[in-house]
Image (cartoon, coloured by chain):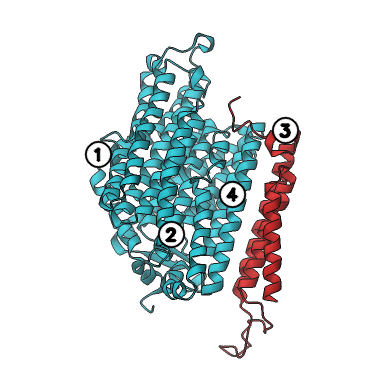
Chain colours: A red, B cyan
Amino acid sequence: MNVLLAAVIGVLYATGVYMLMRRSIVKLILGIGLLSNATNLLLFTVGEVSRAAPPIIPKGETTIEGAVANPIPQALILTAIVIGMAMTAYAVVLVKRAYQLTESDDVDEMRITDVEV
Amino acid sequence: MTVVYPILVPLIAAVICGLVRNYRPLQRWVSLGATGVALVLNIRLLLVVQADGIQSVGIGGWAAPFGIALVADLLSAIMVVVTAFMGLMVAIYAFDDITEDHEANGYHILYQLLLAGVSGSFMTGDMFNLFVWFEIMLISSFVLLAMGGSREETEGGVKYVIMNMISSAVFLAATGLLFGISGTVNMADLGSRIHRLAAMHPVLVTAIAMLYLIAFGMKAAVFPLFSWLPASYHTPPTAITTIFGALLTKVGVYALIRVFTLIFGTVNVLWLAQPLLLVIASLTMLTGVFGAVAQYDVRRLLSFHIVSQIGYLILGLAIFTAASLAGTIFYLVHVILAKSALFLVAGIVNKNYGEYDLKKLGGIYYNNVALSMLFFIPAMALAGIPPLSGFWAKFGVIRAGLEAENYIAVGMALFVSVWTLYSMTKIWTYAYMRKRPADYDRPKVEMPSSSFWLRWGPTLAIGAITVIMGIFAGPLYGLATEAANQLVDPNIYITAVLGGSN
């Protein structure tokens, strides 16, 4: 399972980076999305993927017996997903606005902040 | 509780601003009042930390390392004081500078959230929580940057957003990997376990350190990852540019200092990190200043200077002695103040003469001596002319470099400071001393006295502090040295957060 997940993460990172290298800003957004999901999956994988009971202490006891899942990676991923979604939503709106203003989705056309005009 | 206030005050202010969103003047006063309160409380925090040592609190009553810890050591406390001070100054300046359109779009809410994010990044003792504060800071800065909606702002926004999102992904991946091998995200806990981890996974720990270097380096705008900064910082209104230039990159520098002292400072990562940081620092100083020299738009010129000054900060970190870290901390405060004053002056010049472009400016000295002095003092402070703050800041870093026998880096720092002086002279000659080109010779636009003081007040105050910092450099350097001593011995921090048990 870990090997499979590692391979998936690798492919996602590679695709994401490839997308970031494109000149189209829409592909840039897709690339960012792939990168952030690859990272979420990375968090998931390093937290040890296992079959185990949920980490809930039974009523009336103070400890749990046996193997339980580690809740922290899931908490981290959930937070990261929510933040990633908000960021992506903003980026999409911004890119749409940039497209309206420049009438191009080519990053090479977006040079007015870099060169003397 | 003192540890919570730097975050709590701006967060509450943001909520209040949201509630009174339809009453725009009221929002301004809330924003102003909140930064004032934050400044008082943060100074109190600094005094408490100085008297009683590192303060730590577990959020929600969950003790570290299980809960999220907020930790105030001297560096954090100094940084939140500077944050609140800059927050207050820019809040005053914003009265005149920020248009009603911006305010209607929620400028004050986002401004307070930005300050909360910055303060949170300085206060947190938890790697993942640092990520969350970074994101709060970033999302508010994204919106603030592109709020005006012009083509320039939007294009600058795209570059800024994309680069910062990549850096966030790298940051998160590094934190995930670190969590994977250590099972903790608490910084103090990581610091106490890192020896064992580095012995078990030497390659992985080095790789994680490098990922952090990339992630924070991108936020701090170091060579070669700084391209987003000069592409975006000059586009929004002056107040927004100033607060960005003052705080955002410095949060990246702070995170680098924190991670490389507390977590990776004592393990065998420095063999790679230290020479790398030295090279990065030198090239950042150099490319930044050369970029600045080539510019004619004042704001772009100053944006490149932000990059150049980041190089000095990284140099102090790279030398990695108590003296050099003290120099870096002093430098951090100095550069935040001096650079902000210059941006604010650029805003005043633009208000009076309607231009940011050096080619179209001229003769301000003959027309308005007071304004030229307002520019001259922070400019000389930035260039490092004694007795202003910049001299002592550079002196500290360079002396530490000489003691550590890093002659090449020291030579580079001195070489770059000559060019810094040159680029300040360029602004001085073009905008202030020479005669204004006849094509652009428009009469000066007089400001009404209310907006005059709203702009001059904060600029004067910051300029005065660069002078005061120079004159009272001794005691302030003492404070910076104390802060650096806490950094070079991570055990102080670890014991304060985890208690004596580890």
Question: Residue B359's spot in the image, x, y percent?
Answer: 50, 19
Q: How far apart are the alpha carbons under marks 4 and 1?
A: 38 Å
Considering the numbered disc 3 on the image, is that residue within a helix, a strand or a loop? helix
Considering the numbered disc 2 on the image, is that residue within a helix, a strand or a loop? helix
Do the dots labelled 1 and 2 sit on one chain? yes
Whether residue B388 is visible to the viewer of this picture, yes or no, is yes
Q: Residue at x 48, y 64 (%)?
A: B206
In this figure, which residue is indicated by the disc labeled 2? B272
Left or right of residue B324, residue B341 in this image:
right
In this figure, which residue is indicated by the disc labeled 1? B471
Left or right of residue A26, residue B174 in this image:
left
Q: Amino acid at mark 2?
A: Leu
> Circle 3 marks a residue in which chain?
A
Residue B158, label in figure: none
Using the rendered view, name the quadrant where residue A117 is placed.
top right
> Circle 2 marks a residue in which chain?
B
